[in-house]
Image (spheres, helix red, strand yellow):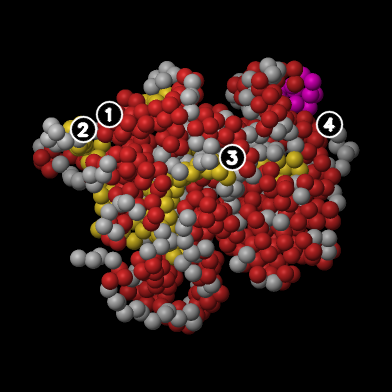
Amino acid sequence: MNNSLSSVDIPQPAPRSSNPQIMAEEIIERLTYRIGKDAKVAKPHDWLTASILVVRDRIIDRWMDSTRRVYKTGDKRVYYLSLEFLIGRLMRDAVSNLGLLSEIRDALTSLGVDIDVIAGLEPDAALGNGGLGRLAACFMESMATVDIPAYGYGIRYVHGLFRQQMADGWQVELPETWLAHGNPWEFERRESSYEIGYGGSVESVGAYDEPPRFVWKPAERVIAMAYDTPIVGWRGKRVNTLRLWSAQPIDPILLDAFNAGDHIGALRESNKAESLTRVLYPADANPAGQELRLRQEYFFSSASLQDILRRHLQQYPDFINLHDKVAIQLNDTHPAVSIAELMRLLVDVHGMDFDESWEITRKTFSYTNHTLLPEALESWPVPLFERLLPRHMQIVYAINTKILLEARKEKTFDETQIRSISLIDEGGERRVRMGNLAFVGSHSINGVSALHTELMKETVFADFHALYPTRINNKTNGITPRRWLMQCNPGLTDLIREAIGPSFEDDTEALKALDAFADDASFQEKFAAVKRANKVQLANLVGSRMGIRLDPSAMFDIQIKRIHEYKRQLLNIVEAVALYDQIRSHPELDWVPRVKFFAGKAAPSYHNAKLIIKLANDVARVINNDPAVRGLLKIVFVPNYNVTLAEVMVPAADLSEQISTAGMEASGTGNMKFALNGALTIGTLDGANVEMRDHVGEENIVIFGMTAEEVAQTRADAYDPRAVIEASPELSQALSAIASGVFSPDDRQRFAGLTDGIYNNDWFLVAGDFDAYAKAQRDVDQIWSDPSAWYGKTIRNTARMGWFSSDRTIRQYASEIWRA
């Protein structure tokens, strides 16, 4: 039987009306028959669900049409495998991309419902942490926008990362309950269920005169169940699919154990399966946490690949043309086990030759590297990997043999180079290197900014680059302008449209026309009014949530991102302490009023990152309550950073902090969002900051500190941070205040570890870059003091950021990597 959709001619429903009156009637119909509520007693969450269902119906029409088209044309599909998809709220995104925002607003208004109120009730999908997950979300939207058939594959986390609360300034992790009341956007696909195995043994079968065939007999099995969410492209041109996997037990309850009185033990299989998809990034400081992470990564990788191969066989008789019809992109090393899994499926399940399977695998996969930090290039202890995935361990060894023999014979690699490229790390505890597996199993390995890509060639993958000199390429990250300008900043969007017309909505590089208005006094005044309105919104949010009163006329200086030492929130806090001292010591000077905002989550087991959050809150408590400061400086750490919070903070920023240690940030996308929304960037020449400087002009960005080359040289030259600190009175005084307990009178030793780390090691060069950073901040003050100069620069940032659209990035992936 031919399962292809193109083989059946099915009549299609008539297009649905966008008339507000008809949409209002449909909302009442959904409210009545799908939710079971009379409009007179319906609650805001009922109106939200009913509205989503009306919008969803219009999406489904386009979704099905998109699917039919690709079956009919046989176009190549792109599969994006990512452990994170930070998609945020979907209602406004979908309505805006369909061009129905005013219609649905009018429909709800006629029913006495405020769309802004109900849209604010939609929970953020807790499917990611930071830039990695948000990039995946932007890419999914852009793939639909530029009409590339694509699936995103990930995990349907019940609780996601965690919900962050503050208890006396300390981060407290609580479960995120975004799925507690269901998710009206998703569709359960019970027919797309696959068995996932763990452990067990591998047996060799076949006649003595035939090549051996290997059969893996897992000791444990769980079921991966698919849930689909439609992802709408701009103007609804295409709707792609985000398919997330939920784990279910094969036997939900062990009745014998239950009837014997072991009511808890009877559910152990259910609990074990469900633990796979409960939490994003379970703490891996202990062996159980490491095992759960590896189980998660294999779970979603295996389910995704089984699904991809099933779909391919619906249209084609075998896998000889798999790489011509399928492109699989690995978003970082988390799905790297997919390479061994595809080999297992092709060789063991479908009976293909090993070498032929390897060629197909390598031509099908491509790998995006997001970090130069060795600890972030995942590796797993060999005993753990072999116990959980015994057949995959055999395949890894077989691939390793193939690669090392090639390197030895064809490239005459020496022992040092062989050790570097081996898939097995022999230094100490033997570990499987997932970054190396991703590299050798992919035909393309891309960095995410020009600097990052060059550093990949020179550092973590230098020997691989010598072995495969054409594989590494650059694809600088981008952001979707629909979410990060049109939706989060409607005031600025309307102002731009009024000035240059609507062409930028379809081509963000058309924003360049805004350059002509950068020095126009009237336009600057309107631009400033939009910025102030956004700042008032953020100030109101902080006031209502935290009880802190903020002055919107102050400079809003914002650093929001994952809390990590290389991102240097600590440098920002130390400079704030130094500024605090200066304001108190020199009250006669004309200080610029400034509010420093922080937001971000620290990994639960990352002690120093959590200590940095506590320091920010302790410093805020002292500075915000000191009358000597006269309100000139305030510190605010906003809890539970997510997409929705970012959509308020990004448009309100005057100054964007992108101050990572040079050479350590792969790209950054927060930097792009801030600049697009008219913020001035203060940053190092790191990640995409380099390309941003080239695009916006070095006079419209404030760059400070060491370059990546200077950082490497400083570390190599027996750097002495203590001498640097002693030579800088402001830095020395700030560190002394922190270390002595000025900000932690209840525990004067609380931050001694942080300050000792700067004095005795300073790997992230907080001391090394401090004076340059402090000077750059005073340069920012000078620019701020001249409003015309300030708005001229920030308008030019908005005008010149069009190149950083994720549409551009995806088109480059499509033409240069995926051939889609």
Q: Residue furthest right?
A: 588
Q: What amino acid does circle 2 point to?
A: Val
Instruction: Name above or below for residue 559 compared with residue 30.
Output: above
Local SS, label 4: helix
Q: CA distance from mark 3 to mark 1?
A: 35 Å
Q: CA distance from mark 1 to mark 4?
A: 63 Å
Discs 2/4, front: 2
Asked if the residue at tag 2 contacts the one at tag 3, i.e. Cβ–Cβ closer than 8 Å, the answer is no
Circle 4 residue: 585
Report the residue at 20% width, 35% height from top.
211
Asked if the residue at tag 4 contacts the one at tag 1, i.e. Cβ–Cβ closer than 8 Å, the answer is no
In the figure, is residue 144 to the left or right of 808?
left
Instruction: Name above or below for residue 86 compared with residue 333.
Output: below
Asked if the residue at tag 4 contacts the one at tag 2, i.e. Cβ–Cβ closer than 8 Å, the answer is no
Q: What amino acid does circle 4 point to?
A: Ser
Residue 379 makes an appearance in the image: no
* Mark 3 closeness class: few <14, some 14–19, many ≥20 residues within 10 Å: many
Residue 387: give its label.
1
* Mark 1 closeness class: few <14, some 14–19, many ≥20 residues within 10 Å: some
Residue 453: give its label.
3
Asked if the residue at tag 2 contacts the one at tag 1, i.e. Cβ–Cβ closer than 8 Å, the answer is no
Residue 413 makes an appearance in the image: yes
Circle 2 residue: 202
Residue 37 location (% of width, % of height): 36, 71
Q: CA distance from mark 3 to mark 2?
A: 39 Å
Discs 3/1, front: 3
Q: Earlier in the sequence, mark 1 or mark 4?
A: 1
Per the rendered image, the range of residues in magenta is 725-740
In the figure, is residue 419 to the left or right of 491?
left
